[in-house]
């Protein structure tokens, strides 16, 4: 599901494609048909690219053209599209969103690992000097589709592992990483075979900073996000990434309303 910002570019590309198709129909033949066909093709390709990779393409466009987006509520998104800003009575607030990629469930850990995990998390959180939001969206996944996905990822992991092992000078770190990935997929498959319903989770964190100017608030929010990224990655043993463009806007929209079905939620995530 594309956000409002991405939809503008998608509809624009579709319009270009439709115009090209109309021109082809009107002209019928001649040298301009080739040009119209090219326009229609580019419009169609552009719509598909914005739909699939809008979260990457749109920030590049806004940075190059220095476009600032402002919605009806007064929230401003700078050209970098990595932060959301609002001016409240002369005081600026800036928020940055981080995506948490969780690869291992707590139920898959031993009792000792769970205790150690909780201790590391508490120590990390105690080092945060500002208010932080960590949100989890949970849903039950389709067992059949989940099994197909796991088997495909397991096959990919085994292929990467075999290729690395066959190299004249294999990378030990990569081999260890790929072995862990395959082991995780094996564990997930065993859980499905036992009849345990797979739970999906989409997690993200938000940090907000205040400043007397827009630039000051943005700089502080980005600094907090960098610190938070390191703390959460180490404490939760997850991959933490800065969210930009469409992905950031989705999290911002989810603060008000979020998808009500697992299919809608999965389709909204790139």
Image (cartoon, helix red, strand yellow):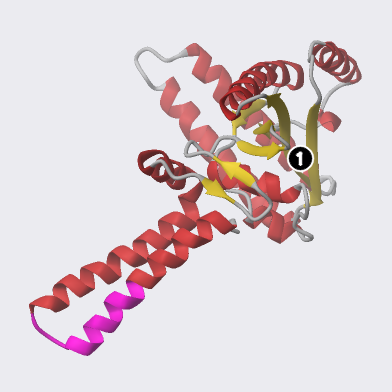
189 in the magenta segment: no
Residue drawn where x is 79% and y is 32% of the image: 134
Residue drawn where x is 67% and y is 24% of the image: 211
150, 241: nearer the viewer: 241
Q: Position of residue 29 (x, y in %)?
A: 12, 86
Which secondary structure class fits the magenta region best? helix
Residue found at the far front of this picture? 90
Magenta stretch in the rendered image? 17-30
Q: Position of residue 30 (x, y in %)?
A: 8, 82
Instruction: Read off the residue under disc 1.
Output: 190
26 in the magenta segment: yes
230, 68: nearer the viewer: 68
Q: Is residue 8 above or below residue 191?
A: below
Is 48 on the left-hand or right-hand side of 29?
right
Q: Position of residue 240 (x, y in %)?
A: 64, 27
Is 77 on the left-hand or right-hand side of 139?
left
Q: Is residue 265 above or below residue 185?
A: below
Is 108 on the left-hand or right-hand side of 59?
right
Q: Secondary structure at mark 1?
A: helix
* Quarter of the image with the N terminus in it: bottom right
Assess disc 1: are there few (<14), some (14-19) or many (≥20) residues with their C-alpha within 10 Å of its C-alpha.
Answer: few
Residue found at the far left of this picture? 31
């Amino acid at each position: 599901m594309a956000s409002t910002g991405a939809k503008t570019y998608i509809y624009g590309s579709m319009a270009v494609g439709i115009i090209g198709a109309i021109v082809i129909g009107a002209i019928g033949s001649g040298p301009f048909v080739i040009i119209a066909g090219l326009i229609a093709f580019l419009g169609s390709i552009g719509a598909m690219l914005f739909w699939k990779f809008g979260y990457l393409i749109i920030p590049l466009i806004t940075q190059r053209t220095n476009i600032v987006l402002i919605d009806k509520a007064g929230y401003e998104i700078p050209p970098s599209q990595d932060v959301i800003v609002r001016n409240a009575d002369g005081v600026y607030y800036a928020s940055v969103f981080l995506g948490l990629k969780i690869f291992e469930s707590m139920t898959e850990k031993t009792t000792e690992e769970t205790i150690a995990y909780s201790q590391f998390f508490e120590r990390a959180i105690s080092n945060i000097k500002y208010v932080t939001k960590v949100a989890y969206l949970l849903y039950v996944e389709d067992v059949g589709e989940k099994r197909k996905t796991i088997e495909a990822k397991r096959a990919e992991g085994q292929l990467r592992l075999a290729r690395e092992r066959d190299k004249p000078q294999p990378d030990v770190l990569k081999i260890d990483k790929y072995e862990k990935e395959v082991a995780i997929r094996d564990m997930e498959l065993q859980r499905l075979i036992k009849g345990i319903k797979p739970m999906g989770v989409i997690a993200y964190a938000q940090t907000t900073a205040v400043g007397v100017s827009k630039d000051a608030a943005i700089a502080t929010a980005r600094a907090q996000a960098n610190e938070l990224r390191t703390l959460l990655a180490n404490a939760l043993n997850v991959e933490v990434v800065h969210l930009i463009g469409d992905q950031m806007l989705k999290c911002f929209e989810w603060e008000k309303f979020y998808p009500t079905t697992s299919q809608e939620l999965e389709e909204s995530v790139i």
